[in-house]
Image (spheres, rainbow, N blue to C red):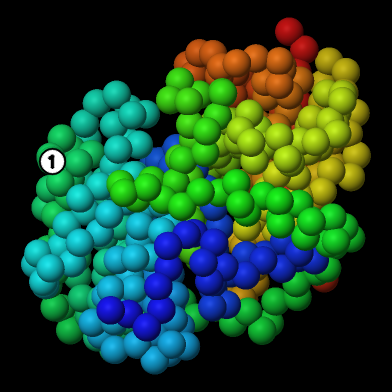
Amino acid sequence: MSKVKVRKSTDLLTYDAPTGRMSVEGIPVTYHCNVFNHFFAKGVKLSLGDEKGREVLYRASEFAHYRLFRAIKERYGLDASETYAFGMDYFRSRGLGVLDIKGRNRIYLLASTHAHTFVKVMRSFSDVPVCDAERGFVAGLLEAALDAEPGDIRVEETSCIGAGDPVCRMEVSVTGKPVDMPQPDYGRVRFYAVDGAEERERLMERLMPEIPEADDSGIISLESAFTDMGKVWISQLPGEYYAYANMRAVEEADRETSRYTLTLAGFNCVFFTYVSIARSPAGRILLEGARTQEDYFVKLAEMGNYFGFGVFKVEELKVGRRCECDVRLYNFYENSYLVALGREPVSYFLLGATLAHALATFRHRYYERDSLGSIRAIFEDFDGVYERMEADISFNPAKNEQRLLLSLPIGS
């Protein structure tokens, strides 16, 4: 038995209200829904090509979880077997499914929420295994437990629920070939304290009890009146997983391709997650006091303040046949990671998220409806608006502020 146990995704979680950051042992973490995780992975693979994209997702998860489990192992003085036990508990508690480590080549995902989500979204099975984040999780966990270096251990998935198999199986090999791992130095990052911390703290105290413990299948589900499943599945992963994969996609892919695919991923995150959460008990807490369309737009944007993204702030909003807005995102985990590596932040998440806020509120009027309607129509809507929008994204390092000036059509 491990010296430290986790049952809920909120266990070991620290929330800093002034900056909107969530972390576990100093490692940034964030909640996303599994639909977003599906489209994020798809966006990376579309940007980089399937084979390279899968490798980047694997490494992103390996690096992030290696750092996480090293920090936890050192903090609590865990030995290898205790670290394994903790890792299996952590996997389930974070809404990733059920991980069972019985030996070096007897590692199973008895349930993988990302694999199940793939089948649900695509309505078909994949030709290749899809649990790249999960095999990276296993690699990072084993390397941390055994005091190895990233890359010393290689994990491959030989069967996958997402490919129609009854269980996901992982095979482990020892390479003895460490790879260079990014070393983010968060000491060089200025985290900007944004007004309204007391209100965010009060709302977080009310919100956390609404995030349930994962069930026996490792699923964290929030009841929602807005989806055909009647619920939305969420999971918690290190922000460094998303940040590293996004960095590689932006830096190594064609810029227009990565801009489109990663903007679409941010769009899907909001449209298929936060619009669903808005119709849940948690959403009702966060949307209290909204009376007008403009109120709903602002409060929907500000939902991100409570799931580890940083602090969203709508500075200006004008609505007619076009929506024109000035939106800021402070201390975004992705921007902080890039600054910690000495890189210039480039992110399309804020653009995609704001597109979804605007279309969901002003065109689809989600708060008056009981379902998402046609998913195909929403995708087509995105493409039409993406082609006609005007967007300017900039980053201010003095305030750790990503700023978006956006003008997009919302009329018929």
* Residue at left offset 47%, top offset 16%: 376
Label 1 residue SS: loop
Determine which residue is flagged by label 1: 166
User: In this rendering, does residue 179 appear at all?
Assistant: no
Instruction: Please give the name of the residue rendered at 33% of the width and 29% of the height, measured from the top-left corner.
Output: 120
Front residue of 68/100: it is 100
Residue at left 53%, top 71%? 12
Q: Where in the figure is residue 130, as x and y percent of width and height? A: 26, 46
Relative placement, left or right, of 114 versus 6 is: left
* Residue sitting at the far top: 412
Q: How far across and down, in percent of the image, does residue 42 sit?
A: 39, 41
Q: Is residue 396 above or below residue 148?
A: above
Q: Quadrant of residue 284?
A: top right
For the N terminus, the image quarter is bottom left
User: Which residue is at 39% across, 91% downward?
Assistant: 77
Question: Residue 37 placed where, x, y %?
Answer: 44, 45
Decide which of 351, 20 is in the foreground and name it. Answer: 20
Q: Is residue 265 left or right of residue 308?
A: left
Q: Is residue 170 visible?
A: yes
Tell me the crowding category of disc 1: few under 14, some 14 to 19, or many 20 or more residues within 10 angstroms, Cα based: few
Q: Quadrant of the C terminus?
A: top right
* Amino acid tagged 1: Pro
Looking at the rendering, which quadrant does residue 150 occupy?
Answer: bottom left
State which quadrant residue 133 falls in. Answer: bottom left
Q: Give the side of residue 33 with respect to residue 162, left or right.
A: right
